[in-house]
Image: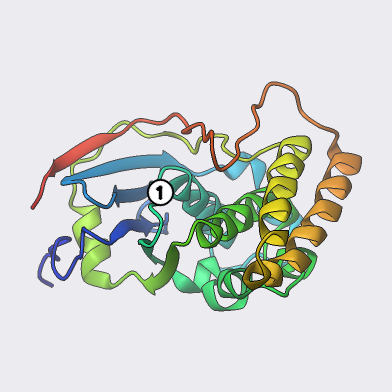
């Protein structure tokens, strides 16, 4: 199989690109490659899965033939980490290459983008420990739309995964704790509700945002708000910490 050129067919004046290669039986490390619009630099990040937060035996939605570190909730955490770093420019967009089956792009992510859905129903596709991450991703996807940008999810192809696997490895770290505690998620959600209410074309997001308010309340009741995490909203996004490597300057 030939190596894939990440620059082929890219429109770097309009789109930011994210390549997400989750862990698998053959590769314990999850890897992402990001390139923002108007940038010539690829940034590679390698992460260890959050296996300790996702005990396979406690979730009925897990696939029995897949290791805990390669379950859909792990792919979701990794996707959220990549989205936390992407730069969004109004009238531009974000293109994400990922494992659409494990990320449930059609069943979950596309429905978030279309609006008029319930976050509690979408959360059933993942284990309970991933609910906060799903809420954060939902906020980010809606935020991108409210900023006048677009986002597309495409299947990562075998040649793309092979090219990612061939990149030089860097010392991996635990997937950063970008997931927000319930009060911070609530603050982000309420700020998006205010924005969505101000424009009729965005009213389709009000249903899911309001169900996320309920989800935040439920999460706080179940686990309590954990101290030590900052709020992250659309105007002041803290980048999660991880090891990173500049792959190169590509035209």
Q: Which quarter of the figure has residue 183?
A: top right
Q: Point out the residue furthest to the right here.
A: 221
Picture quadrant where residue 210 is located: bottom right
Q: Nearer the viewer, residue 133 or 204?
A: 204
Q: Quadrant of residue 235?
A: top right
Relative to 144, residue 179 above or below: above
Question: SS of the residue at dot 1?
Answer: loop
Q: Residues within 10 Å of mark 1 (few under 14, many from 20)?
A: some
**Camera-side residue of 3 and 82:** 82
- Picture residue at 75% right of the left edge, 47% below the top: 190
Q: Residue at x 56, y 74 (%)?
A: 110
Residue 1 horizontal/vertical position (percent): 13, 72
Residue that carries the numbered disc 1 in the rendered image: 28
How many numbered marks, from 0 up? 1
Estimate the x, y position of residue 70 in percent, counting from the top left: 50, 57
Camera-side residue of 110 and 51:
110
Q: How is the image coloured?
A: rainbow
Residue beneath the point at 44% across and 66% down: 150
Q: Is residue 163 above or below residue 245?
A: below
> From the viewer's perspective, is 193 left or right of 250?
right
Residue 69: give x, y in percent of width and height. Answer: 52, 51
């Amino acid at each position: 199989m030939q190596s894939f050129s990440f620059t082929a067919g890219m429109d770097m004046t309009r789109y930011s690109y994210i390549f997400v290669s989750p862990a698998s039986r053959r590769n314990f490390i999850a890897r992402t490659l990001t390139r923002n619009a108007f940038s010539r630099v690829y940034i590679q990040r390698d992460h260890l899965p959050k296996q300790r937060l996702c005990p396979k035996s406690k979730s009925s939605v897990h696939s029995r033939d897949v290791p805990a570190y390669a379950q859909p909730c792990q792919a979701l955490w990794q996707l959220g980490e990549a989205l936390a770093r992407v730069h969004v420019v109004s009238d531009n967009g974000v293109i994400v290459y990922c494992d659409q089956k494990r990320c449930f792009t059609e069943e979950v992510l596309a429905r978030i983008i279309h609006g008029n859905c319930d976050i509690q129903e979408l959360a059933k596709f993942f284990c309970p420990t991933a609910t906060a991450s799903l809420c954060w991703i939902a906020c980010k996807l809606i935020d991108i739309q409210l900023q006048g940008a677009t986002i597309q999810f495409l299947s990562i192809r075998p040649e793309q995964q092979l090219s990612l696997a061939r990149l030089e490895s860097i010392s991996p770290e635990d997937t950063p704790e970008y997931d927000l505690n319930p009060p911070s998620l609530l603050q982000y959600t309420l700020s998006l509700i205010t924005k969505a209410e101000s424009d009729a074309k965005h009213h389709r997001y009000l249903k899911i945002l309001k169900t996320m308010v309920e989800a935040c309340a439920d999460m706080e009741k179940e686990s309590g708000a954990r101290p030590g995490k900052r709020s992250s909203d659309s105007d002041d996004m803290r980048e999660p910490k991880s090891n990173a490597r500049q792959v190169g300057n590509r035209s």
